[in-house]
Amino acid sequence: MSTPVISIAPVRLPAPDRAVDLELRISAPTTGSELPIILLSHGQGPSNHLSSLNGYAPLVNYWAAHGFVVIQPTHLSSRTLNLPPGDPEAPLYQRSRAEDMIRILDRLDEIEDVVPHLRGRLDRGKVAVAGHSMGGHTASLLLGARYTDPRSGEEVNLAEPRISAGVLLAAPGRGGDAVTEFVAENYPFFLSTDFSAMATPALVVAGDKDASTHLTVRGPEWHTDPYFLAPGRKALLTLFDAEHGLGGVSGYDVAETTDENVERVAAVRHLTWAYLRSALYPEDIAWQVACEKLAAAPDPLARVESK
């Protein structure tokens, strides 16, 4: 049963060590206590505002209406910030993105002070991360994936132990010979993506028509790498006929969604919610019920496998 949602933005966290202060959107049910948290990392794309705290309403509204507090940062990679060139991490700010999420967890007291409606209502022991596209890469780092900094040669480990589960939506796969020359030349950190230490439980969501030809030479299966190459408990939700937008998860009626499908978005938001409920609360059978309902449908929109 859904609950009315309150959404507050921008919530600004001063960050002198960052190019600009960190701005957040906080969405929460109007009632309830001991609320679990989802940190949501936006992707990139041609639209100006979807890659910011103003995107992903189809997911955010549903998750918040069904009992989660959703926190959305505007990463430094967002077009809305129009940052000047010159930062060695630009344009995707791969490390900064994950550090934004760690900063949020470090400063939950401050967030509650700025948003009194949340005070005393958060369950800080129940934290998940979710991300779409480049946001899926951000989420994978927080879950334990690693890469090698192409400038320093350092292995970057940003695993966050306070995060207990994750959802990777159309996330990038492995590096090496799986990525295109364009990626190797422009985003060399992708060359070394390594899932071998990503042990935190996660649901990987992939579209079977998500070719992403500008990123990978392997086709849609590339987006399933975080499932097949990572250890630990994982689930894979493969959406039939879905492209990179997974039906339109980044916003309502957005022009860049090449596979707009209301039913697909409804399935994604419900199945991701159910997965996180059961991952954070093992006694909750929401995920089992959702999977059984999906499998029993006369014309299912997707399939699920687990390991």
Image: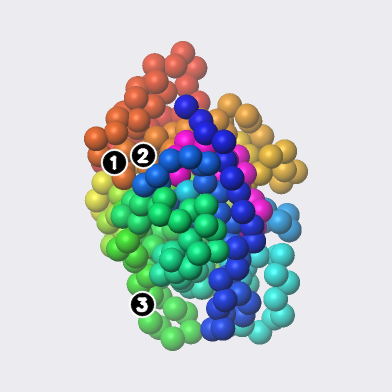
The number of numbered badges drawn on the structure is: 3
Q: Secondary structure at mark 1?
A: loop
Find disc 3 in the rendering and name its residue.
155
| Mark 1 lies on residue | 281
Q: Residues within 10 Å of mark 2 (few under 14, many from 20)?
A: many
Eye-nearest disc, 1 or 3: 1
Q: Is residue 24 magenta?
A: no
Neighbour class for label 3 at 10 Å: few (<14), some, many (≥20)? few
Secondary element under disc 2, as helix, strand or loop, is: helix
- Depth check: give the residue in front, 128 or 42: 128
Q: Amino acid at mark 3?
A: Glu
Residue, x 39% and y 63% (percent of image)?
142
CA separation, marks 1 and 2?
Answer: 6 Å
Pick whichever of labels 2 and 3 is earlier in the sequence: 3
Is 55 within the magenta? yes
Residue range in magenta is 51-68
Amino acid type at circle 2 is Arg
Residue at 36%, 77% (x, y): give it: 155
- Three-letter amino acid code at disc 1? Tyr
Q: Is residue 112 left or right of residue 229?
A: right
Viewer-side residue, 193 vs 33: 33
Query: Which x, y percent locates residue 59?
Result: 55, 42
Q: Are marks 2 and 3 in contact (CB under 8 Å)?
A: no
Residue denoted by label 2: 277
Labels 1 & 2 near each other (Cβ < 8 A): yes
On the question of residue 252 being in view, the answer is: yes
